[in-house]
Image (spheres, rainbow, N blue to C red):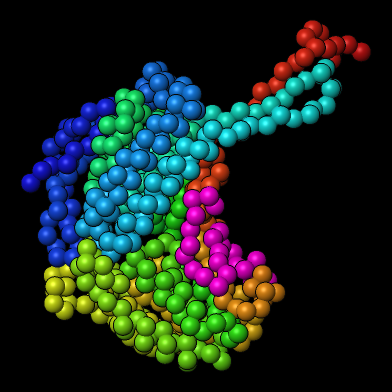
Amino acid sequence: MERKQMYIDGEWTSGTSGKTFEVINPANGEVLAEVAESSVEDTRAAIAAAKRSFYETREWRDMDSQARSDLLLKIADRIEEELDSFAMLDSLDNGKPLREAQGDVADGVHCFRYYAGLIRAPHGGVYDVNEGFGRMHSYTVHEPVGVCAQITPWNYPFLMAVWKLAPALAAGNSIVFKPSSVTPLSAIRLFELFEEAGLPRGAVNLVMGPGSTVGNELGESMDVDMVTFTGSTSVGKSLMRAASSNVKRIGLELGGKSPNVIFADADLEGAVEWAMIGIFFNQGEVCSAGSRIIIEESIRDQFVKRLAERANAITIGDPVRNPDMGPLVSKQHMEQVLAYIEKGKAEGATLVCGGERYTEGECAKGYFVRPTIFDNCTSDMTIVREEIFGPVVTIQTFRTKEEAIALANDTEYGLAGAVFTSDLTTAMTVIREIRAGITWINCYNPTFNEAPWGGYKQSGIGRELGVHGLEEYQEIKQININLTPGPVGWYEH
């Protein structure tokens, strides 16, 4: 079996320790690949390479924006040529249906092209200022942050990598990138394309291994200027503490327990369809999943009945065959989700459907969980309060608009939320009151490279995508010019 290597300072290497870890196909439990595990020494070498690239050789940093843009477009073209291959990698080691993985890769191509175009656009500003110290001209320029450490999750291996890499590269930073150890294969191939495209030595570095080793080193290093992370809130908090070592910039996209508020006047079939997408897309392994359905009491019964019918009809199987749902990402994660389901039963929620591992036919050895609906849930239940990150949804009811808003905001998270109603005033009132960074009206989950992505409260800090996504990886420098040189006489009386 081929051993996949890390990429440091323009070279592929097995690292200093010789350790490896296995990448498992969650559909059948078989080993897909063996990957070199980065040590602390390897991580420090990658940081040092990025630092030399940015502060000494400066080839990528000082490249003019048009040349940098052209290279990013070249990368986008190469990804597009290999779209099906990238999608297969994500489907195999993540478990997502192949068509969903193909959509992720297509979005990644667009993301590279978006930022390649954005850095050609005007930026900065010019300001009128007072003349207390003479005639002045003040303006700002955007500059790269420096050495950026980036840590991505396992649920969208390719797309989350691109969301971080494309804007950071567009801004001219040097990067140390760590994908999830569970799903590193598409990132490894992406770095092979970076090498083929001719990115300068040290501008991009790939390290792989446990967050407790590699991630901590990236967070604590005095030579890292910025760290970005997508993943759990608990890990995000630990990275914030680590980043205090040199007060490095930090970007966090963390957990969610997002409300999907449905009023009685909503289109019922439309609301059911979008609720299905909101919780069962990508097996529910989505930070912004609509995992809390909050529905007006008068339509609860018919809605839950229809949702259960649709959930029971979901096809489950090998993701490369394009079922509705594939396996969860790992055995460990499957067991965590099943434990939450048992907790829901124990705390008195009504199990409407699902609630068990799926082992029929070809799925016998995989990590499959049936789509699960819990009714009669209360806000104090564990399954309502904690992020499950699987195909499990809870149902709560409300009678008034005010009660709906209170239930929606009764969470430590604030990543996403939705409102379904045919009344525009209700829609706008409620969506403005929901404390979340990404919201939808009469739909759930559409995401765009052009619009910012990020949360409130314990769902994170900063924004990815859009203009904000580029600005996350830029410093803003103010430059003031005295147009009337000479003494200003401030000490004369």
The answer, for residue 360, to whether it is visible in the render is yes
Q: Look at 34% across and 28% down and name the residue there.
A: 199
Q: Is residue 477 left or right of residue 70?
A: right
The answer to if 449 sits in the magenta stretch is: yes
Total numbered labels: 0
Q: In this view, which residue lies farthest toward the top? A: 486
As rendered, which of 219 and 205 lies closer to the eye? 205
Q: Residue at x 47, y 91 (%)?
A: 302
Is residue 223 or residue 271 the one in the foreground?
Answer: 271
Task: Answer above or below: position of 455 versus 70.
Answer: below
- Which segment did they paint magenta? 429-451
Q: Residue at x 44, y 42 (%)?
A: 113
Q: Tell whether position 490 is magenta.
A: no
In this rendering, the answer to whether 466 lies above or below 54 is below
Tell me which secondary structure the magenta stretch mostly adopts.
loop
Q: Nearer the viewer, residue 481 or 231?
A: 481
Task: Identify the residue at the far left of this view.
Answer: 1
Horizontal relation, residue 400 to residue 343: left or right:
right
Q: Is residue 40 left or right of residue 72?
A: left
